[in-house]
Image: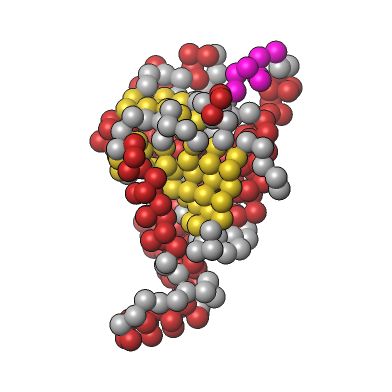
Amino acid sequence: MSPQTLIVDESGDGLLQVTLNRPQTRNALNTQMGLELREIFAPLAFHPRQVRCVLITGSGDKAFCAGGDLKERNGMSDEQWRVQHAIFEEAYYAIMNCVVPVIGAVNGSAFGGGCELALACDFIYASSSARFALPETTLGILPGCGGTQNLPRAVGERRAKELILTGRAFTAQEGYEWGMVNRVCEPADLMPAALATARQMCTSAPVSLRQAKTAIRRGLDVDLRTGLAIEVEAYNRTVVTEDRLEGVRAFGEKRKPVFKGK
């Protein structure tokens, strides 16, 4: 793939960094960006290769993602709109279904689809200057890439209703206080903090990372008893790995383990 709207950097330590790169439009999501996100993330639901963690951010210091590119959408027929939105759905669902951890480093405004993109990540680090909003109801539509589902799970039903039904913007600090944002950083500190966390994850056993994420995600959708069964199933998948043996050996030998994802 030769991306036109993204900068994709895969380091040798298992970190995949994806930067939304349409700064002239505040990194607005157009059809091409949807296709490229889908192409990157869809395979990661089934075959992560050497990827252990993904970091998503935006280029520049003004915007993470301004949402859907309304200039591109202006004049679309109903069918063209639906086809484009299906591409966005597939891309966002692929991010949510990614088996490795996905961190959102929100470096500026994240409105509409940009806010939904941040919510599709496993957790969010945000610049203190970042602002979030789901203003779709003020445009005659509603959040359609996970916003009505992920925001209530992050901030609670009543607050999510207020934010979605009014479309009002909120700050990174408010998002932190409500439980949507994990950490608020000064703008210059955002990427170093997010990268440090991503690289820390890359030192953990890949199978353990994937199974722990799966257990959390699947467990939240079921009752506690079923969730505990899911947890044990995920745990047992790590017992038979070479990495489990390596982790125990390294602990006994007082050294850092070298995990191979096997």
Residue at horizontal 60 percent and vertical 40 percent from the top: 6
Residue at horizontal 71 percent and vertical 29 percent from the top: 83
Residue at horizontal 47 percent and vertical 33 percent from the top: 60
Q: Is residue 32 left or right of residue 185?
A: right
**Which image quarter holds the C terminus?**
bottom right
Q: Position of residue 94 (x, y in %)?
A: 59, 46
Instruction: Residue 133: tell me if it is visible.
Output: yes
Q: Position of residue 101 (x, y in %)?
A: 47, 54
Instruction: Residue 147: tell me if it is visible.
Output: no
Residue most extreme to the left: 177
Q: Is residue 101 left or right of residue 154?
A: right
Q: Which residues are magenta?
A: 69-75
Residue at horizontal 40 percent and vertical 77 percent from the top: 257
Taking depth in this image into account, of 257 and 208 the one nearest to the observer is 257
Taking depth in this image into account, of 5 and 144 the one nearest to the observer is 5
What is the basis of the colouring in this image?
secondary structure
Taking depth in this image into account, of 57 and 86 the one nearest to the observer is 57
Q: Position of residue 9 (x, y in %)?
A: 56, 51
Q: Is residue 44 left or right of residue 122?
A: right
Q: Is residue 51 left or right of residue 258?
A: right
Q: Position of residue 78 (x, y in %)?
A: 71, 18
**Is 73 one of the magenta-colored residues?**
yes
* Count of marks, rendered view: 0
Check the image and report above or below for 203 versus 191. Answer: below
